[in-house]
Image: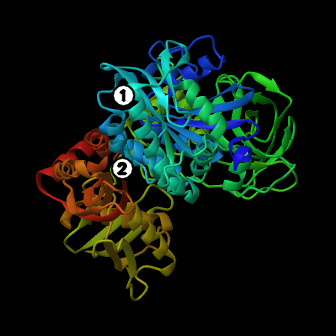
Amino acid sequence: MGQDVRSPRGPRCIALVGPFQSGKTSLLEAILARTGAIPRAGSVDAGNSVGDASAEARHHKMSVGLTATTTSFMGENYTFVDCPGSVEFSHDMRAALPGVDAAVVVCEADEKKLPQLQIILRELEDLKIPRFLFLNKIDRASKRVRETLAMLQPASRVPLVLRQIPIWNGELIQGFVDLALERAFVYREHKASEVIALEGGDLDREKEARFSMLEKLADHDDALMEQLLEDIQPPRDAVFDDLARELREGLICPVLIGSATRGNGVLRLMKALRHEAPDVTETAKRLGARASKEALGYVLKTVHLQHGGKLSLTRIIAGHLDDGATLHAASGESGRVSGILAASGAHDTKRAAAEAGDTVALGKLDAIKTGDTVAAGKSAPAALVEIGPLPPVLAMSIAAVDRKDDVKLGQALLRLNEEDPSLTMVQNARTHDTVLWGQGEMHLRVALERLRERFGINVKSHPPVVGYQETIRKPITQRGRHKKQSGGHGQFGDVMLDIKPLSRGEGFKFEEKVVGGAVPRNYIPAVEEGVKDGLTRGPLGFPVVDVQVTLTDGSYHSVDSSDLAFRTAARIGLSEGLPQCQPVLLEPIHTVEIVCPTEATAKINAILSGRRGQILGFDTREGWSGWDCVRAMMPEAEIGELIVELRSATAGAGSFTRQFDHMAEVTGRAADQIIAAHRDAA
């Protein structure tokens, strides 16, 4: 295998991913400082980090969007894509991952974050992206590394292979042993570690840990297995080759240790990336991209800057791209590149061109969106991959405080959706409200902050209107009569209507059984329209459904009758008849499917019961060790902020999907409260 396995070429793109607050942004700072890209590492708390540079991220002291920064190490360029850890902003990570060469999964020895770690590792596994695990905050560890590894292993479907073990000085970690190199290093504050002699107990621990590492590698290497069985020490180069090959084939996940805030372990991580992470050639193969001289790219993220227009952060998968080139998207859209900028946090370094492997920001591609596959040349490329957003879980109705900003608000929401497709807007046809859907409370809050800070629109919000309806229980016959004389032609319409309930879900039916021309046939469509008018708001204040109305009789005037008169008569008949039909309130019921860690299932059942949920059952989540899937029927009114309680009960890992199932009657005090609240709001 030798040199070919361990010597990727060209610029590489590495994703930094991991559970919320595991230290990804701190690790990026440490990498940039160690590689000389910045004079010293900033911090999230101090608000001076390269990552989390947006106003919203600074304010909340957390990643709310993706940051890409390029640095060089030992003569090679690396673009690091720092992805948000919160599940609410996970689409930024999910959309960017297909275009990277490898990922560094930053985690810590925290059992509560295990479900979050499993979600992230599953995403990487499904996309077949090689990954390292960086066990961060090792200086604060309360348990031994091997215990931590045993705790973390259930989150990964492939073996976690320990590459380093710590050197302890009492309760403090003072360095580490590299099991592949068979060398010991002592940490030096903000400097490269120093090599020390390996002796005594540390030597014994190293031999045992190294043998364990080699055993896992030997599962996929018969020659290595034979050497171990015969007690022959394998050549060091062969061990490195195995580590690189098995990483790239997704057979193992190597584990490195360190402390991002102290800069410990960063140099070893960079050397592992340099020797073992694949390059863009292998990424192109993984994506099924053909070799081409024409540029082929994947858009990791789009962003609308307050003053700089639109930028599309793009990984060049193959070929050569010149500034000014026209790019075609798999979606059929196209655009002319107006500026190629280096991915340097602020995207401010212009370039004349980009080559395969480069990660660059492309200017003014107005029709191109996050996740698009783009190509130069004469025709649109096939999509390399399609990553759809997760189903939304929380909504709010929004409106511009100043009505003159309504158009501006619509345009801003479209731009936010381009940047983050997991943020969507829906127009409620009945209430004419704009409903913004997102992945959680913070996701929607940040969206409102962006509308205000970046687009200059002040927005007011309130919970979305629940889709209550009403129906009737009792049939009735009702006359509707409209007669008006005001000089000249008057208005006259007279109808007899049979109003009766239908079975739940049948909607609305209109029939006519008029005999003898009591109502001329040309007026019957107007009668149906008048009936529909009367059903838009029933006696309880909601749309009326599951009703059949039959026109049985009526009368007309040869001069004063008209479509409008008969439409008005029918509406009057409905509005006078419906209150006598024992109207009853209906509320929408949804089927809800919740996925959660098994240890949280009991809490979830209690939450559902407290929200009038009817639990249908639960089972293990297919293909997910340690997870359950709970199914229930829930009123729409109770689903509103369900995700807030759910995330609280599952350390941010649980989620749900919902689907409308049926309308159910609401009676008694609950119905009275809903009707009273609706009248107060009207």
Point 58% across, 37% down: residue? 15
Position of residue 10 in the picture relative to residue 510 (left or right):
right
**Residue 501, quarter of the rendered image:** bottom left
Could you say whether the residue bearing mark 1 is in a helix, strand or loop? helix
**Residue 9, quarter of the rendered image:** top right
Instruction: Please say which color scheme the image uses.
Output: rainbow
Q: Quadrant of the C terminus?
A: top left
Position of residue 495 in the picture relative to residue 294 (left or right):
left
Point 24% across, 48% down: residue? 600
Above or below: residue 200 compared with residue 600? above
Q: Are marks 1 and 2 in contact (CB under 8 Å)?
A: no
Tag nearer the camera, 1 or 2: 1
| Residue 63 seen in render | no
What amino acid does circle 1 point to? Answer: Gly
Point 44% across, 63% down: residue? 491
Above or below: residue 226 compared with residue 365? below
Above or below: residue 592 compared with residue 446? below
Q: CA distance from mark 1 to mark 2?
A: 29 Å
Give the residue number, with chain letter if any, for mark 2: 154
| Nearest the eye: 672 or 46 | 46
The outermost residue toward the left is 668
What amino acid does circle 2 point to? Answer: Pro
Q: Position of residue 149 (x, y in %)?
A: 37, 41
Point 43% across, 25% down: residue? 199
Q: Residues within 10 Å of mark 2 (few under 14, many from 20)?
A: some
Mark identifier at residue 201: 1
Q: Position of residue 84 (x, y in %)?
A: 49, 34
Q: Position of residue 76 (x, y in %)?
A: 73, 30
| Residue 431 seen in render | yes
Q: Residues within 10 Å of mark 1 (few under 14, many from 20)?
A: few
Q: Earlier in the sequence, mark 1 or mark 2?
A: 2
